[in-house]
Amino acid sequence: MSLWEYANPVKFIRTTDKVLPWIWALTGICLLTGLVWGFFFTPDDFRQGSTVKIIYIHVPSALMAINAWLMMLVASLVWIVRRHHVSALAARAAAPVGAVMTMIALATGAFWGQPMWGTWWAWDPRLTSFLILFLFYLGYMALWEAIENDDTAADLTSILCLVGSVFAILSRYAVNFWNQGLHQGATLSLDKEENISDVFWFPLLVCIAGFVLLFIALVFLRTQTEIRARRTRALLAREGQA
């Protein structure tokens, strides 16, 4: 079976209809388990106190904000190379989800940073690149809405996605590129000295799994909606020409 079979809109909708209930169920289990475990059954940090528990929302949302854009990049490249409409519509469907994840990451980062840094915002490399990434999300969505022809919109938004990917990468690796800045190092790291304690690490992994599944479920659902909306526009256009 070829992966490209799912570029067929009918095949995509039938397949995602079958798997979506399972994904929603796993999403609920992971999020409920991870958040309850993290917020109620982990200790306060010896330096950050109870504010450290924002990590269970902030880190997963930040990871998904970056990876949502990278998923849009892959889908956009597929559109440019193979001209599969489902890939372009999947990228469009992922944008609002990624924008919300970015907004959650920025908001929770401010609530986490205020007691630690003494300020709600700092022009730190990672924070600044994250804010620019959020603006790219808004610009991407606005460009889709501004252009009536879907293929033209897909072409232009794909180019915008390529440009915005620079800031997605910077958001992920800004701490490694620049040593200065208030933002801490990587929360999840192969370096045992830098990685967080296991007592926080395990529930965080469950929360991340929940956010990943939530993103997949929302993108599948929104892609189905975009496919149906495209069909409706095509039918209305045909009726108008008749």
Image (cartoon, grey):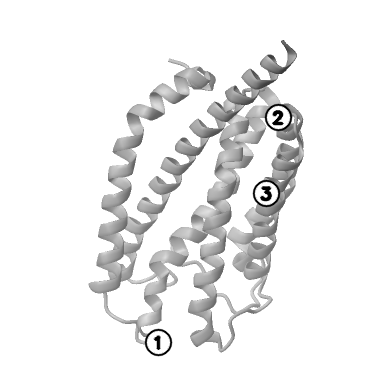
Which amino acid lies under the numbered mark 1 shown in the image of this protein?
Answer: Arg
The three-letter amino acid code for the residue at tag 3 is: Ser
Indicate whether 49 appears above or below 161.
below
Q: CA distance from mark 1 to mark 2?
A: 52 Å
Foreground disc of the pair 1, 2: 2
Q: Earlier in the sequence, mark 1 or mark 2?
A: 1
Q: Which mark is residue 150?
A: 2
Under mark 2, the amino acid is Asp
Query: Which mark identifies residue 165?
Result: 3
Which quadrant, please, contains the C terminus?
top right
- Residue 140 visible in image: yes
Quadrant (top left/top right/bottom left/bottom right) for the N terminus: top left
The span from disc 3 to disc 2 (Cα, nearest Å) is 22 Å
Q: Position of residue 149 (x, y in %)?
A: 75, 29
Q: Which residue is mark 1?
A: 47
Tell me what residue is drawn at x 54 percent, y 76 percent.
110
Residue 202 got which mark?
none
Foreground pick, 186 / 61: 61
How many angstroms separate mark 3 from mark 1 (CA)?
35 Å
Instruction: Decide: few, some or many residues near mark 2? Use Cα within 10 Å; few <14, some 14-19, many ≥20.
Output: some
Indicate which disc, 3 or 2, sits on the residue closer to the N terminus. Answer: 2
Disc 2 secondary structure class = helix
